[in-house]
Amino acid sequence: MTLEIIIFILAILFGIVFYWREAKNNALYRFCNKVTHSKELQMKLENRKGFIHQQPFLLRLVWVTLFFLVIAIVLTIIIPFTVNYLQYFIAAIVGTLIGTYIASLFLFAKEKTNKENLEKTFQKGKDIIDDFSEDVREKFEDEVQPETTEIPKKEPEAPQKSARERLKDKGMIK
């Protein structure tokens, strides 16, 4: 159990470092992209995507699992005795994924929370609220206007027959 916790914590740190390194330089991913794709389908130079950086959860899971699977195969070949690696393997994968999300939250939060972005977001929210309130005002003004106009008084209509009298007229009751 202690070794699992140590591996889990180290995997979180590995995930943070791996995400940070890949956010700064995605040369390995770019190389793999050049090898596997034709010239027309290759990544653009301004694309920052990597194995972990800017990938959805499932692709992160696939790449991290593949990475640790290769490490597990190498360790199985190198170490002469058998060890149950499954619990360490899973702890490393989960820890690395958690580390990548921690890195994306904290290490790159200042890019998302600088003053200009916050002002832009605040202004966008303010505009949305103004648009919504204008629509509501227009709706209520349209409803209020018919009420302010004079309603013509209805002329009293002739009293209608009761239900009993109508049934008698149809011959359903005597």
Image (cartoon, rainbow, N blue to C red):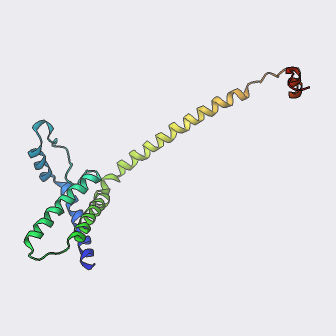
33 to 143, vertically: above or below: below
Q: Quadrant of the N terminus?
A: bottom left
19 to 169, vertically: above or below: below
The quarter holding residue 120 reads: top left
Residue 31 lies, in percent from the top left, at: 10, 49
- Does residue 20 show up? no
**Residue 130 horizontal side relative to residue 30, left or right:** right
The residue that appears at 31% across and 56% down in the rendered structure is 110
The residue that appears at 59% across and 35% down in the rendered structure is 137
What is the total number of numbered labels drawn onto the structure image?
0
User: In this orientation, which residue lies closer to the viewer: 132 or 30?
Assistant: 30
112 to 94, vertically: above or below: above
User: In this orientation, which residue lies closer to the viewer: 64 or 151?
Assistant: 64
Residue 117 lies, in percent from the top left, at: 36, 48
6 to 153, vertically: above or below: below
- Does residue 138 show up? yes
The residue that appears at 63% across and 34% down in the rendered structure is 140
Residue 17 lies, in percent from the top left, at: 21, 63
Q: Quadrant of the C terminus?
A: top right
Residue 128 lies, in percent from the top left, at: 47, 40
The quarter holding residue 166 reads: top right
The quarter holding residue 142 reads: top right
